Amino acid sequence: MATDLSTRYLGLELAHPVMASASPLTGSLDSLLALQDAGASAVVLPSLFEEQVEHDYLSLGSHFDDEAAFNPEAHGGFFPALDDYNTGADQYLSVLTAAKNELSIPVIASLNGTSEGGWTHYASTLEAEGADALELNIYHLAADSDLTGEEVETRYLRLVEQVRSEISIPLAVKIGPFFSSPSNMVRRLEAAGADGVVLFNRFYQPDIDLETLDIAPNLQLSSPAEMRLVLRWVGIIFGRVGIDLAATTGVHDAEGVVKLVLAGASVAMLASALLHHGPDHLRSIIAGVGEWFDERGYKSLDQARGSVSQRSVADPSAYERANYMRTLTSYQAQ
Ligand SMILES: Cc1cc2nc3c(=O)[nH]c(=O)nc-3n(C[C@H](O)[C@H](O)[C@H](O)COP(=O)(O)O)c2cc1C
């Protein structure tokens, strides 16, 4: 009998664990439909950025004789009242509405920001427009050397608490890997109200243009080798928290998805591989995942999930420092 690939993520029942992550491919109805046709079990829309919301908010503020409009801390009733205004945020809503009307798979909206403030009220607008869940991408670069690690973490937690208080749909938090104690951070995100975490945000590194001496943004798609970092932390964190783990970065093929599920992921998300090969690439990945589990006689994905996590493997140190020593030594012995 074929393996039951169904999985639960953020309380959503998904046919299998292969999702489309936020990228330009999830930003238009045509490509969203192509992703659904190719078999994506759910989609995450591109992020609406704090800066976009604040920009709309402040430029509108100059037209209103309303003090609240100038106060980024202001809460209550302002954003929903702007529904008819033609703004960047409005365009976001039109994609969300179209996606909800035309797609049968779950649609997860995404907000991307770093600070507490009035902009987070937009989460409730996304909920009202029918988003099945919200992904909050906290893309914060702690460049200020006065800021301690504890202060950075507190900032994350406050933001999560604030967004959580705006909505009742499930909330996933997408974070980067640069915490002193990622496991502890995920536990605290759970306590702050997250229903899931998306590991890990891929930070885009600046480059220097040697002709102009400018800092050049230079986006490169991921490579499969980048998945290792995610695999390690999914494997370590699985079983230590009660919330769902989603994996992103470096997932390019069926083998990658299988490994992440074995480590403990509820879902694996793809962006770079789909941008490179197109939405149809999903078909072979989904088929490959099914074949791998079928051939080994797994009844369900639940049976496999976390079976190679740190808490289940015979040698848990393989996820930790001992493995580092062994890896270096084995290379010298080659
Ligand atoms: C062109 C591009 C645009 C992206 N836009 C977003 C975005 O709006 N919000 C977000 O949370 N992630 C965004 N991402 C990150 C992806 O969702 C994904 O987490 C990251 O690319 C790592 O996965 P991958 O290795 O499959 O590409 C973007 C990635 C790319 C390549």
Image (spheres, rainbow, N blue to C red):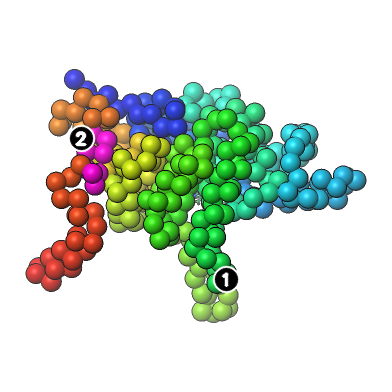
Q: Is residue 47 visible?
A: no
Name the main secondary structure of what is drawn in magenta. loop
> Mark 2, residues whose alpha carbon is within 10 Å: few (<14), some, or many (≥20)?
some
Image coordinates for residue 322, horizontal then vertical, percent: 19, 61
User: Which three-letter amino acid code belongs to the residue tagged 2?
Assistant: Trp
Judged from the image, the secondary structure of the residue bearing numbered disc 1 is: loop
Ligand 1 under 8 Å from disc 1 Cβ? no
Question: Mark 2 vs mark 1: which is more N-terminal?
Answer: 1
- Quick one: label 1, few (<14), some, or many (20+) residues within 10 Å? few
Q: Position of residue 161 (x, y in %)?
A: 57, 43
Which is in the foreground here, disc 2 or disc 1?
A: 1
Q: State the image quarter where residue 328 is shown.
A: bottom left
Q: Residue at x 55, y 45 (%)?
A: 160
The quarter of the image holding the C terminus is bottom left
Query: What residue did someone put label 2 on?
Result: 292
Q: Where 306 sits versus 129, above or below?
A: below
Instruction: Name the residue tied to disc 1.
Output: 146
Residue positioned 58% across, 49% down in the render: 158
332 part of magenta stretch: no
Badge number at residue 79 = none
| Viewer can see residue 185 | yes
Coordinates of residue 209 in the picture (x, y in percent): 52, 75
Considering the image in quadrants, where does the N terminus appear? top left
Image: 162 above or below 114: above
Mark 2 and mark 1: Cα distance apart in space: 50 Å
Q: Nearer the viewer, residue 323 or 189?
A: 189
Left or right position of 154 against 276:
right
Magenta range: 304-311
Q: Assign a secondary structure to mark 2.
A: helix
Task: Identify residue type, mark 1.
Answer: Asp
Residue 133 horizontal side relative to residue 294, left or right: right
Position of residue 16 in the picture relative to residue 104 (left or right)? left
